[in-house]
Amino acid sequence: MTFLGAPYDLTPVETVLATLAQRHGGEPFRYVATPNVDHLVRLMRRPELGPLYTDAWQCWCDSHVVRRLGLLFGLRLPHLNGTDVVERIFAEVLRPGDRIAVIAPRPEVLSALARSAPTIEVVGHCPPMGFADDEAAMAACMRFVADHPSRFLFVAVGSPQSEMLAHRLASAPGVTGTGLCIGAAMEFVSGLKTRAPKPMQALGFEWLHRLISEPRRLWRRYILGIGPLAILVAREAVRRVRP
């Protein structure tokens, strides 16, 4: 189903986790995208990025805002918060001795993750900033994934770089496993960052906690995205009333 310009799966979280539990490391590579408001605004401005989402194996609604906007149009989008799902993958899906690969923004994410999950083999690669525009750096990422086959690949270097890498890997011969483009989830799972209090999470205000925690980095994304999001909602309304 397409909503606000991006595809979304309607599969509930329990079914998603059951499906992930059945995936093993030797299967052809597939990846998951998690389009939130930031992704939607970028897609509006850069429609050439559309295949990064339409070619994904699954697209999860990782946004309370998008889910609530869906209700205005009679849609019930399952909310699959990336960090929540990753925490459950570690708790319920991964088994001792499983290998996971991580494309991480910096080395301390990898070391913190290894400490927090001592029964899991963690291998990682930290590409330079802007690697998606550097063919040699992108090739190095792809070579790392091919050389370290893993049950799951967590791509945690931000959007759209994460999706661009996953999209390239999906068409590369011989690459296996399941890729998850999960933003900053690994920093929360590893304990490097603190999540919002449970009441804020339940009310859908985790984004506000992040904005307060990292205002310099996130204010443009959250504040300047309001206008484009309103345009997307208007376009969606027009699309749905047209015969």
Image (spheres, rainbow, N blue to C red):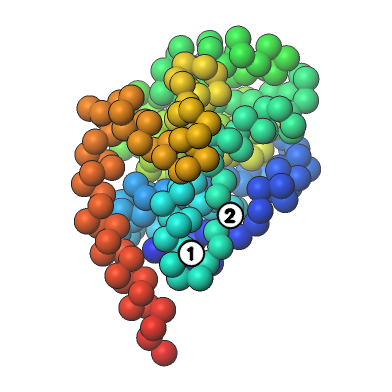
Q: Which mark is residue 71?
A: 1
Mark 1 and mark 2: Cα distance apart in space: 11 Å
Type of amino acid under label 2 = Pro
Q: Is residue 242 above or below residue 227?
A: below
Going by the image, does 214 lie left or right of 36?
A: left
Picture quadrant of residue 50: bottom left
Viewer-nearest residue: 13 or 204: 204
- Image location of residue 170, percent across then percent down: 56, 46
Q: Is residue 32 visible?
A: no
Q: Is residue 67 above or below residue 84?
A: below
Q: Is residue 230 visible?
A: yes
Q: Residue at x 45, y 29 (%)?
A: 196
Viewer-nearest residue: 146 or 66: 66
Q: How many marks?
A: 2
Numbered disc 1: secondary structure: helix
Please tell me how crowded label 1 is: few (under 14), some (14-19), or many (20+) other residues with Cα within 10 Å.
few
Numbered disc 2: secondary structure: loop
